[in-house]
Image (tube, grey):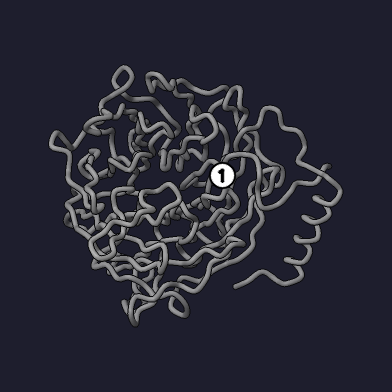
Amino acid sequence: MKFSQIRRITQATVLSLAIGLGMTACSEDYTIDFLYVTTSRSSTGNISAYKVDNQSGSLTQIVDSPFSSGGRDPVAIVLSPNNQALYVLNSLDSTIVEFLIGTDGKIYMTNTYNLGPTAKGGTYPTAAVIDAANKYLVVTFSYQINVPVATPPTLPGPGGIAVFPINSDNSLGTVVANGTLPYFPVSANPVSIGISPNPNNCPTSGGTVSASCPINGGNYVPSIYVVEDTTTTGLVLTYSLSLSTGQLTAVASTAAGVVPYAIAEDPTGRFVYITDQSANQLIGYIVQANGSLNAMVNGPFSTGLYPEGITADPRGKYIYVTNYNASTLNGYAIDQATGTPSGVFSNGTTATGTGPTCVTIEPSQGIYLYTSNFVDNSVSGLQLDPHTGALVNIQNTPFSAAGGPTCAVTVSAGSHAYQALQP
């Protein structure tokens, strides 16, 4: 479902007027980033939006926040690499909602895309990623269209993967077909998805590697990692993503614990980490040249109770894991040679709000970390030491959020899709 033409014209007029008059965003000397938190505990989902103070990491709610997520039960939110758009997955409506970001941090709902039976082939989206070149949005979902779904759903799967081209205006194009299917099928329930630039994975022609590889503007082949929960064991499926066609090519399948949940990649593309909720562990992998994963020989590694969210800091030195049942955060230092994670402060554990889900680190300085806390409707803010990885509470933490925070993403302030008008 598209927004009306009138709304598009109005937005375009406001943007043109702002630029024509030389207007810029109100001076925000202490704002370096924005934080967006999806929340699910209402008849329709919401997005709590905040400004980040660059001197303290403290959060201030943006005017008009929370914003509607455009659907029920938003479970994931992903930022476009061009820093202009957010895409929110609404599980109960099986929709993807596109928002454009204003320079003042406000967000503008622009398009809604139906993932379900009449369009793209699946229901109950779970996770999404975008490649670094901003060409494709890749979405996992729990059920294929030809599989009856109980109400409420019981055992998920078989699910699938939908690949959407991203247009220059951040809208999504027609989903990439896999032969006769409008999706790429998987046999079980895909719960999470990751992506790595994998500069070692270059296309070949006649046995010769493309001269434009690796990633520095060249024709590299990103690796896509889909985490599956089969109800008896976990798997991580590796695919190559063609940036010219959007086609996914299966590469490998690797064991992933008992009940895997979330995935993160270090920024260099050498290591991948997956949380295992049932076994209370973190599984580490070494990325091979073709993108396939080999488990680290000294893993898996202990976490707190029921680990969920995971992220790597922008420097690739640390990873952080939320423990939902323990209401804590584990921090680990990454051995730069082997990828092995080890605790970075005291016993490696810091308290958060109740029921932490996602964890995100702001990109501008890479020192402020935030967790979305589902049970107590809050956001915890922590400052990390870039030399040791240790965490301390941010001023005024925790911060209130709308009901049932499910996930979070941080966005650099600066050039965005809409120019804010002076008040």
Where is the C terminus found, in terms of image quarters?
Answer: top right
Question: How far across and how far down the image is residue 366, in percent?
Answer: 49, 30
Q: How many marks?
A: 1
| Quarter of the view holding residue 399 | top right
Which of the pair 270/75 is nearer the observer?
270
Which of the pair 383/416 is nearer the observer?
416
In the picture, measured across the screen, residue 212 lies left or right of residue 403, that is: left
Question: How far across and how far down the image is residue 421, in percent?
Answer: 80, 46
Q: Residue furthest top?
A: 346
| Quarter of the view holding residue 327 | top left
| Quarter of the view holding residue 238 | bottom left
Q: Residue furthest bottom?
A: 180
Where is the N terminus found, in terms of image quarters?
Answer: bottom right
Q: Residue furthest right?
A: 21
Which of the pair 417/269 is nearer the observer?
269
The residue that appears at 65% across and 40% down in the rendered structure is: 414
Amino acid type, residue under disc 1 in the picture: Tyr
Q: Which residue is mark 1?
A: 36
Q: Is residue 79 above or below residue 398?
A: below
The residue that appears at 66% across and 52% down in the rendered structure is: 417
In the picture, measured across the screen, residue 150 lies left or right of residue 187, that is: right
In the picture, measured across the screen, residue 214 lies left or right of residue 34, that is: left
Q: Is residue 376 above or below residue 16?
A: above
In the picture, measured across the screen, residue 336 lies left or right of residue 245, that is: left
The residue that appears at 46% across and 38% down in the rendered structure is: 360
Q: Is residue 86 above or below residue 377?
A: below
The residue that appears at 75% across and 60% down in the rendered structure is: 11
Other residues around mark 1 within 10 Å, as few (<14) / some (14–19) / many (≥20) = many
